[in-house]
Image (cartoon, rainbow, N blue to C red):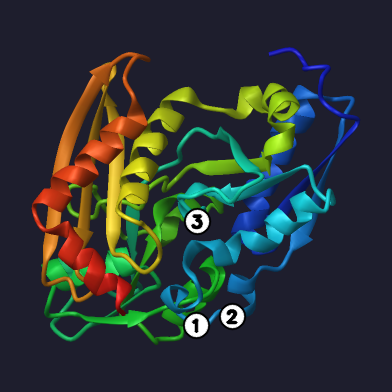
Amino acid sequence: MPANHSAPSRIVIATRESRLALWQARHVQTRLQALHPETRVELLGVTTRGDRNPRCPLSQMGGKGVFVKELETALRERRADLAVHSLKDMPMDMPPGFALAAITARENPCDAFVSNRFAGLDALPPGAVVGTSSLRRAAILRSTCPQLKIETLRGNLDTRLRKLDEGGYDAIILAAAGLVRLGLEDRIRAMLPPERFLPAPGQGALGIEILAARTADGAAWLEALHDAPTARCARAERAFSQALGGSCRIPLGAYAVLDGEALWLRGFVASPDGRRLIAGERRGESGESGDPEALGRRLAEDLRTRGADALLSEAAGR
């Protein structure tokens, strides 16, 4: 694609400063620089509340927004032009004044089993300690592997791997995409397929956020980074989560794929202890006429009619 001359002379990308976040921001930086060679593309490192409190569970810190708000402040103060996030970390309700301008092509959306001693979940002995920071993952583990001991594991990807290597856990569960992006595929002992571990909404994709007031011009110079098929799937997943009040306080998963030209969306919500889990699926209309958000809302309503509200109330009362 030729360079888009509507791009400004300088673009500043706000990013968290973990190794994975910097990889993601540099990936976007490299692509933008290639698309707009006359534009100077720079990074602005930002430390978020979630990064400053690596030991506190996300469900006690206000949810996904703890990794986003400081980056949005940089956008609001015009210190940055865009922010790059893992899409799964972005709140389902965008705050006033901000817009999700582009969603990149998805990396592997699966969760990954990582262990120095065991080949997979089924090889873990009773009482083995599995670390995760995700209520979603913890609920699935408690539902399907009640013999295991699930413990909270916070920190960036390198910190989690270090804690595993120090012997604090028999295994940990991580997003495969982060390991792949950092060239750490060899740490993956087994992929956990969606049939067993439904991913988080948007897992594997990057979201590029800008000020809503800059949507018209920003969309033009971000157009080549936007992947329409991934965006269709992610919009259905995020709508499902939004309709159920999705946050880090609710064990919830959603995953959509294109089945021909139609969307196939699967989703679940669980009690925090994993003892009750309600799952469902829906297929949407074919082609661009299909409404991903409507599909997500319909699946959420299906789960509500089967008792999801009780699980949501229980999670909200944690």
Question: Percent position (x, y) of residue 181?
Answer: 54, 49
Question: Percent position (x, y) of residue 11?
Answer: 83, 38
Question: Percent position (x, y) of residue 312?
Answer: 24, 65
Identify the image quadrant of the C terminus: bottom left
Residue 190 in which image quadrant: bottom left
Residue where numbered disc 1 is placed:
56
Q: Amino acid at mark 2?
A: Asn
Q: Is residue 36 above or below residue 273?
A: above
In the picture as drawn, the residue positioned furthest to the front comes out as 96
Left or right of 222? Residue 164 is left
Between 241 and 143, the residue placed more toward the observer is 241
SS at circle 3: helix
Q: For residue 53, which numbered disc appears in the image?
A: 2
Q: Is residue 35 above or below residue 68?
A: above
Q: For residue 214, which numbered disc appears in the image?
A: none
Left or right of 140? Residue 85 is right
SS at circle 1: loop
Residue where numbered disc 3 is placed:
89
Q: Is residue 31 visible?
A: yes
